[in-house]
Image: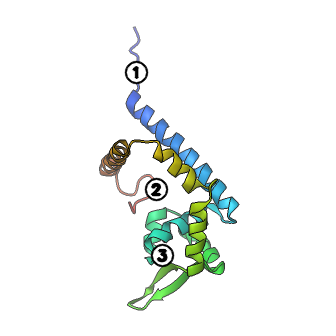
Amino acid sequence: METEQKEPVRSTAMMQSFWNVQRHLVRAAHQTAQENGLSLPQFHSLMTIAPRSPITQKELAAYTHLPKSTLSQSIEGLVQAEWVIRETNPDNRREVVLRLSDHGRQFVETIKRQEAGMQQRLEHILDQIDPAVFEQMLQTHAQIAEGLKEILAPGNGGCTDD
């Protein structure tokens, strides 16, 4: 009689659930980016800079996990559009500091208020979740992320700046 290998059902269900949510989030972000004349990396960078402005380019790279060349092109486009101001840190001449311009802050607020935009649609969905359940979900995600971080060998699987 052949021994049947049992698949860890909970881990598979969790991975499929995360992948499904991520797929839809990326599609929504891509749609919102396109509707506002942005590439997905520009949208990701802009929405990451907004609540953290000013932020160093190195910090932005750690948050976004974008390849260096993609991040540089993204930032250049945002600077050219006058949404982001790029400056050299006077205390460390090798460090680049990014901040939203007034025009950039207005643009981000416009994106956040768009009824068909990602932010508003996601807020509407999250409003339907009990606040205690939402907080528990965030804590659970953090616990899973920390557990995975502890068991992954450094340098394997791509991102190491987490």
CA separation, marks 3 and 2? 19 Å
Instruction: Identify which amino acid the numbered label 3 is placed on.
Output: Gln
Q: Quadrant of residue 112?
A: bottom right
Image quarter hosting the C terminus? bottom left
Q: Which residue is drawn at 39% across and 22% down?
A: 6
Image position of 78 (left or right of 54): right
Instruction: Identify which amino acid the numbered label 1 is placed on.
Output: Gln
SS at circle 1 = loop
SS at circle 2 = loop
The mark that comes first in sequence, 3 or 2, is 3
Image position of 75 (left or right of 136): right
103 or 97: nearer the viewer: 103
The mark that comes first in sequence, 1 or 3, is 1
Q: Nearer the viewer, mark 1 or mark 3?
A: 3
What percent of the width, then of the height, locates residue 31?
66, 54
Q: Which mark is residue 5?
A: 1
Instruction: Identify which amino acid the numbered label 2 is placed on.
Output: Gly
CA separation, marks 1 and 3? 47 Å
Image position of 158 (left or right of 145): right
What percent of the width, then of the height, locates residue 53?
46, 75
Q: Which of marks 3 and 2 is in front?
A: 3
What percent of the width, then of the height, locates residue 7?
41, 26
Model colouring: rainbow
In this view, the residue farthest toward the top is: 1
Residue at numbered disc 3: 57
Q: Which mark is residue 158?
A: 2
